[in-house]
Amino acid sequence: MTEEYEIADLDDAIAAAAFRRLVRHLQQRHDAQNIDLMGLAGFCRNCLADWIRDAGFEGDKAEARALIHGMPFAEWKDKYQTEATSEQLARMEESLKKNGGSH
C-alpha cells in the first residue's frame, strides 16, 4: 500500500525555512537563468515573487522581485540575465503548457 503525502501536512515553519533556502540558493546561482528555470520547471524567480504576493506579501511587484532576487530586478537583469535563445523560448512555452493554467 502506498502512503500518500500532502504538502499541507508540512509544518509552516519547516516550509518557510525550505523556501528561504531555495531563495538564497537562487540568489547565489545566477547562472540558472529564469528562462531555463521556466523551460525546465515552469516557474522562475519572478514567479516566486508573484507567489509571495499571492500569499499576502504587502509589497508591490518590484519589492517582491527585489526580495527574491536579492537586489532590484533591473539591477539583477543588467548584471546576470542573458538574451533568451529561440530554443529556450520554445522550451519555456512547452513547459508552461504543463502547468495547467497556473504558474
Image: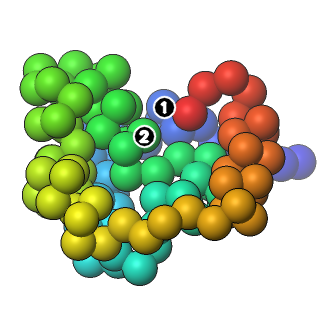
**Looking at the picture, does residue 74 appear above or below residue 102?**
below
| Quadrant in which residue 48 is drawn | top left
> Counting other residues with Cα less than 10 Å from the Cα at mark 2, is it few (<14), some (14-19), or many (20 or more)?
some
Residue 95 x %, y %: 73, 48
Q: Which residue is mark 2?
A: 47
Q: Residue at x 12, y 36 (%)?
A: 63
Give the quadrant of the C terminus. Answer: top right
**Looking at the picture, does residue 66 appear above or below residue 40?**
above
Q: Residue at x 37, y 44 (%)?
A: 46
Q: Is residue 28 left or right of residue 91?
A: left
Query: What is the secondary structure assignment of the residue under circle 2?
Result: helix
Q: Residue at x 33, y 21 (%)?
A: 54
**Looking at the picture, does residue 56 appear above or below residue 73?**
above
Q: Residue at x 74, y 65 (%)?
A: 87
Residue 80 x %, y %: 30, 72
Give the camera-side residue of 79 and 19: 79
Query: Which residue type does callout 1 highlight?
Result: Ala
**Looking at the picture, does residue 100 appear above or below residue 31?**
above
Query: Which residue type does callout 2 highlight?
Result: Cys
Q: Is residue 10 left or right of residue 95?
A: left
Residue 6 x %, y %: 59, 36
| Quadrant in which residue 89 is drawn | bottom right
Residue sitting farthest toward the right:
1
Give the camera-side residue of 29 and 55: 29
Quick check: can you spot residue 101?
Answer: yes
Q: Which mark is residue 8?
A: 1
> Which is more N-terminal, label 1 or label 2?
1
Between circles 2 and 1, the one closer to the viewer is: 2
Between the C-alphas of marks 2 and 1, the distance is 20 Å
Query: What is the secondary structure assignment of the residue under circle 1?
Result: helix
